Amino acid sequence: MDLTAHLDHLRRELSRAGDLGGPQARALAEQLTGPLESAFRLALLDALTAAAEEITRELAPGSVELRLRATGPDFVVTPPPAEQPAPDPTAGVTEGDEAATARINFRLSEQLKGRIEEAAGRAGLSVNAWLVRAAGAAADAHRTGRAHRRAPVGGERYTGWVR
């Protein structure tokens, strides 16, 4: 998007309108060019920022960043990280290898238990294997700093054009 070209067009249109009304109208058009240009830039920045925020919410944990350059705004897209295949929870565990496994007991609601059983069934895994994979993936994401983070919403720092 070449913002400079759009602003040049705006200046030309105001100049043409001023030419139709004589010297006073031309002077008024020249006086209005600066404030209208600033208002145009601000309105465009607001619209693009809102679009970037909306796209970021849909793309989370990826993001869209709005960068302002001399010629106009640019979008920088950071896609979500590629899904890594879950490690095989039984890899490296052989029959009778008790040191490689541990047992943990925990309590959960019947509703959550049912949801876990459904998810394990859809994945074609036992509940135990599904829980090991889910816990391992969550622990790895937390350890590598790739745990789910909410996308930023409103109140970010804005930068703009200065003359």
Image (cartoon, helix red, strand yellow):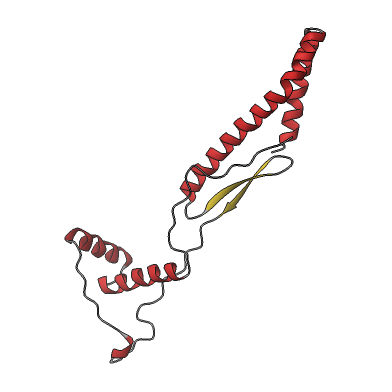
State which quarter of the image contains the C terminus: top right
Left or right: 15 in relation to 144: right
6 and 96: which is toward the camera: 6
Against 17, residue 132 (above or below) is below
Please identify the quarter of the rendering in which residue 160 is found.
top right
48 and 117: which is toward the camera: 48
Q: Position of residue 134 (x, y in %)?
A: 34, 68
- Name the residue at 21% across, 75% down: 105
- Name the residue at 77% across, 28% down: 8
State which quarter of the image contains the N terminus: top right
Against 127, residue 159 (above or below) is above
Against 148, residue 15 (above or below) is above
Task: Return the residue found at the far bottom.
Answer: 96
Left or right: 13 in relation to 59: right
Tally of marks: 0
Task: Return the residue found at the far right.
Answer: 23
Against 19, residue 1 (above or below) is below
162 and 76: which is toward the camera: 162
- Name the residue at 61% across, 36% down: 45
Q: Position of residue 150 (x, y in %)?
A: 44, 53
Q: Position of residue 149 (x, y in %)?
A: 44, 56
Left or right: 92 in relation to 30: left
Task: Return the residue found at the far top.
Answer: 21
Q: Position of residue 113 (x, y in %)?
A: 21, 63
- Name the residue at 70% across, 44% down: 69
Please identify the quarter of the rendering in which residue 106 is found.
bottom left
